[in-house]
Image: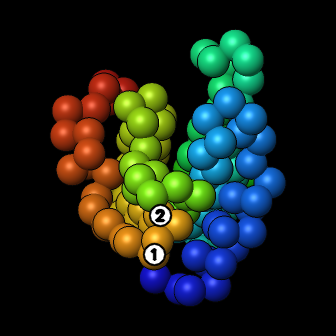
Amino acid sequence: MNEKTIEKAIRVMKNAYNPYSHYAVGCVLIADSGKEYVGCNVENASYGATLCAERVALGNAISQGERKFEEIVLVSSGESLPIPCGICRQMLSEFGDMRVLAINNLGDRQSCMLSELLPMAFKLEK
């Protein structure tokens, strides 16, 4: 993993809007094209309206025409690793398997494939 990509995730994490959880997440989604798309969590008093960093980055990438991704890097302001939630796992799985790298504020890292986090994802039947 490119350390500049991790630094980019840390920078975007600082833009998170998280007055409820006080848990900021920054994300860089790397497309097969090599382009990087960022996102941060955006919370809302109506918790269901909250957007995770992963979905913000995914929306950013999709709006730019990307459809395949090789890796997603997540950093958090807390001690827990920012592992994608179930909704984010399903959203990301629509666009193929990818490496997931999660890093907490202590520098702990965990890496796995998205398919390990969501082994039985709903799939578009062709």
Residue found at x 69% / y 52%: 39
**Amino acid on which disc 2 is placed:** Asn
Above or below, 70 against 97 in this view is: below
Taking 11 as reference, is 1 above or below it?
below
Picture quadrant where residue 42 is located:
top right
Asked if residue 72 lies left or right of residue 49, the reply is left
Return the residue at label 1. 107
Q: Secondary structure at mark 2?
A: loop
Tell me the number on the disc at residue 104. Answer: 2
8 to the left or right of 121: right
Residue 108 place in picture, x, y as percent: 38, 72
* Quadrant of res 87: top left
What is the tally of numbered marks visible in this picture?
2
Say few, some or many: other residues with alpha carbon within 10 Å of mark 2 (under 14 / 14 to 19 / 20 or more): some
Q: Amino acid at mark 1?
A: Gly
| Quarter of the view holding residue 102 | bottom left
According to the image, what is the colour scheme of the structure?
Answer: rainbow
Residue 18 visible in rendering: yes
Q: Are marks 2 and 1 in contact (CB under 8 Å)?
A: yes
**Is 21 located above or below residue 68 in the figure?**
above
